[in-house]
Amino acid sequence: MKASLFSAALAAALLVVAGCSDDVLDRIGTNPDNPETATARLLLPQVEVNDAFAISGTDLAWYASIFVEHSTGVHAQFEQSDKRAPGYFNPNITANLWGNLYNAQLKDLQVLLEQASTGREAGAWRYVGIGKILRARTLGVATDLFGRIPNSEALQGAANLKPRFDTQESVYQDMQRLLDEALLDLDKPSNQNPGPADLFYGGDATKWKRAAYALKARYANRLSKRDPQGSATRALAALAQGLQGPQDDLTFRSFSASATAENPWYQELNDRRHFAVSSTLYGLLSSLNDPRRFSLVGTVGGQRVPAPNGTAQNDQAGTRYSKASAQLINATAPMPLMTFAEQKFIEAEAHLRLGNRPAAYAAYQTAVQTALSQQFVSAADAATYTAQPAVFMGAANLTLRDIIVQKYLSFYVYQPIEAYNDYRRTGFPALNNPAGPAPRRFPYAQPSFDSNRENVPTVGPQDGVWWDDGTED
């Protein structure tokens, strides 16, 4: 799997960048991981592909999908995790996940930032700004799932083989700092514009700035249990300059039908089939008479058959339970990382915490309507759906549960990490796995215990991260 991740990332990156110029073609043979030969123009697409593929599209997301009951594990280690088998989720399981975050993504981002700011390509501020946004997002994924993580002493090589694990509070402060610096860097004159080497926005600084503000709002809102009022105020301040509509979504759209460049969820569905549609997700859709139960859920034997979490039979053959629809998961399906719909759900929640019900409800309505349109629901079906009092209930009756449940549905299938974060933060939606509660964090990776045991926090699966339970391990 690790080799396929690398080949997919490299193939997609080089295919795109190779079309940029003859000069780039001359450099295709260089090693993008080697700071002596890599260029920003080669490194940027690599980290962008890795973000969409290895960070958002493989095991980090797949385990989160099971724990938050978007999916039910029906084969191999994911079935064991769904059934909470003894030792089902352990440091050996997360070794590759940790490696994707640190040895690949954060390492390459460090090279990119050094190269473009003070290195051989100093003054490439467009690259620096984009790189800092991607670094903040990667740190966010890492700390949200693991808690305390190496940050201030990370990636120093032989100079420090035993980095400390920084508090999550300090990592969150650093994420906001990176995003603030990125906003400034994107305004600086840049001696290079990535153009098509930027697979998200084609080098458009305005769109990247909007994405940075949207991420600032996401991370501000994440601290709702630590600072309910302040987190809401900070989120709304950032949202004022965030995404202006779905056209600004931070979404990866460069997967192709090539065997090494397909959407990773599609590769999993075709090659291994570890997952089925969860009965929790499908039950919510059915209880709301939600048209997405038809557009997002596939059929088996002509019927839609969700798999019960914790008790499903093995179904690698895909003959018992429904999978996600082919409309949703296919070779070239886009991978959303931050969307206008999510931003409007954050806005609704923040206004609700501050007691501004009319503004909360207006944002909620826009969020739901945007999500429906992006999840293949026709305007007529959306109108029928939202006419139900259970969906558009009026400002006076809007609750946090309403917001988070609709947000949870909008995240299916590609954003389970965010759904998992929201569940731990709010308790919504109610989960139903009879085998036991989902872990509230991912276990630290075995290589960290092997080389840096004295600095690895001592935690258990039901110990929340700082923004969840208020303690720093």
Image (cartoon, helix red, strand yellow):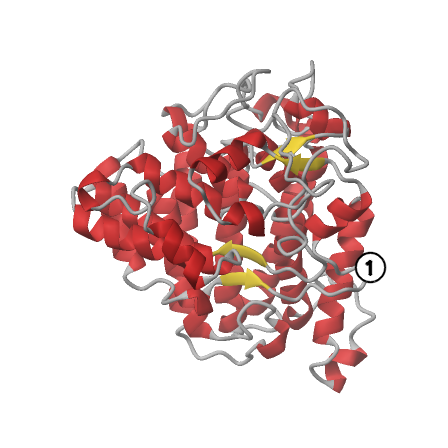
Please state which of residues 195 and 293 is positioned toward the viewer in this rendering.
293
Is residue 85 rendered to the left or right of residue 174? right
Q: Amino acid at mark 1?
A: Ala
Residue 155 percent across, percent down from the top left: 62, 45
272 to the left or right of 311:
right
Q: Residue 169 versus residue 160: which sits nearer the camera?
A: 169
Q: Is residue 374 above or below residue 404?
A: below
User: What is the x, y in percent for residue 384?
Assistant: 38, 53
Which residue has dot 1 on it? Answer: 259
Residue drawn 30% across the image and 32% down it: 226
Residue at the (58%, 76%) spot, across then down = 194
Could you say which quadrant of the image residue 470 lies in?
Answer: top left
Percent of width and height locating residue 191? 53, 81
Most extreme residue toward the top is: 86
Q: Quadrant of residue 73?
A: top right
* Image height of 40 relative to 322, above or below: below
57 left or right, relative to 274: left
The residue at the far bottom in this view is: 22
Element class at badge 1: loop
The answer to whether residue 412 is above or below residue 328 is: above
Q: Residue at x 73, y 80 (%)?
A: 19
Query: Residue 379, position in %: x, y?
Result: 43, 63
Mark 1: few/some/many CA within 10 Å (<14, 14-19, 20+) = few
